[in-house]
Amino acid sequence: MARIAYVDGRYLPITAASVSIEDRGFQFADSIYEVLKRINGRLIDADRHLARLRRSLGELQIAQPCSEAALLRIVQETLARNALKDALIYIQVSRGAAPRNHPFPASTRPTLVVTVRRLSLPSQLEREQGAGVVTAPDQRWGRCDIKSTGLLPNVLAKQEAQQAGAREAWLVSGEGTEAVVTEGSSTNAWIVDAAGVLRTHPATPAILGGVTRSVVLELARAEGIAVEERAFTLGELAKAREAFLTSATSLVLPVTRIDGRPVANGMPGETTRRLMACYAERCGLPAHR
Ligand code: PDD
C-alpha cells in the first residue's frame, strides 16, 4: 500500500506529494517540526508535543496553520489512511512559499505537511546491551530550544556517529575536560554522576527541551531519585556511574560506551533500568521490552 501524506489540505501518495520550490522551509530552513508517536492506537504526550509546536511557531512568528484540534484530526486521518497502529508522526510547518527574499513575506500561508511511518523502537539487544555514543563539537546556533528544521550540524554529527559505529553523537561545548555536554544530535543526554545524582542539561536555549526529557524528570522525581537539571562536563562523564539518552522514538535507552570506552562496568545501570521501565509503562509498553 502506498504511503499517504497530508500536504496543505490534501491527502496524497507520498510520491505525488510536494511543496513549492519557493517554500521557505526548502530555501531557508524557515520552518519547524515535531515528532511524536502512537502506540497501541494512543498518541503519547500529544499535548506536550503540540505545546512545543505552538511555542516553536511563536518564537519564529510563523502563523498557526490551523487550530490544534484540526491538526489532531489531520494526524488521525493520516494515520487511518496509512492503516498504522503504532506509528511515528512527523509534522512540519514552514512560513510558506514566496519569491526568495530574506525578510518575512507580507502575506503567505504557512505550509503544513504531515507524514507517518511505522514506529521503529530500539531492539531488545540494544536495550539490554546499551548504545554507543561518540562526542562531537556542538556547532549549532543559539536557539536550539526551537525545534527548527535547520539541522545541518545535527546531521553532520549523526553521520560521524554512524561512521564510528555508534548510535548517537553527544554534542560538546567548550574545551578539554571542562567542556559541557549539551545534548545528543537528536536526543537528550543524561548521566548518573559519581555522587549518584541523575543529571541532564537545564532547559536553556542551548538544548531542545525534549518531551521525553520532561516526562523522565517527572518520573524520576516521583520515584524519589535525586535529580538535578545541571550540565555535566566531559570530566564528569568519564566518571559517570550510568548514562542514557531519551527521545520520543528512542524512549529511555542506556548508553554503555562513550568514544569506545565503557561507562562504569559497560552494562545498563540500575537507575537507567528503573526509568526505562517507568517510561515503558507510561507508553503502555511491556516493561522488559
Ligand atoms: N528529535 N534533542 C534534539 C536535538 C532533538 O532533535 C530531539 C528530538 C530531542 C528529544 O526530544 P523528544 O523527547 O521530544 O523526542 C532532543 C526528534 C525525534 C527528531 O529530530 O527526529
Image: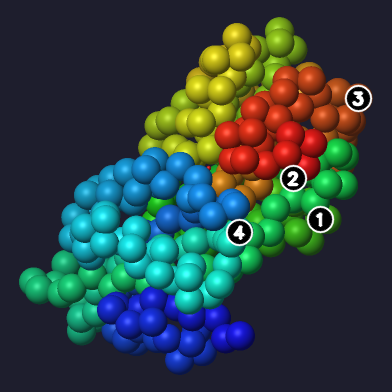
Out of 231 and 197, give the one closest to the viewer: 197
Q: Is mark 1 on a helix, strand or loop?
A: loop
The residue indicated by pointer 2 is 134
Residue at the image position 51 percent from the left and 22 percent from the top? 218
Residue at the image position 74 percent from the left and 50 percent from the top? 122
Q: Which amino acid does label 4 sit on?
A: Asp
- Please give left or right for residue 118 compared with residue 20 in the image: right
Between disc 3 and disc 4, the foreground one is 4
Q: Residues within 10 Å of mark 2 (few under 14, many from 20)?
A: many
The residue indicated by pointer 4 is 86
Q: Which of marks 4 and 1 is nearer the N terminus?
A: 4
Label 1 near label 3: C-beta < 8 Å? no
Q: Earlier in the sequence, mark 4 or mark 2?
A: 4
The residue indicated by pointer 1 is 164
Residue 216 position (above or below residue 206): above
Label 2 near label 4: C-beta < 8 Å? no
Can I make out residue 167 in this image?
yes
- Quarter of the figure with residue 182: top right
Q: In which quarter of the image is the C terminus?
A: top right
Out of 255 and 211, give the one closest to the viewer: 211
Label 3 – label 4 distance at C-alpha: 34 Å
> What label does residue 265 carry, if any?
3
Q: Residue furthest bottom?
A: 16
Residue 183 position (above or below residue 178): below
Residue 60 position (above or below residue 118): above
Q: Earlier in the sequence, mark 2 or mark 3?
A: 2
Label 1 near label 2: C-beta < 8 Å? yes
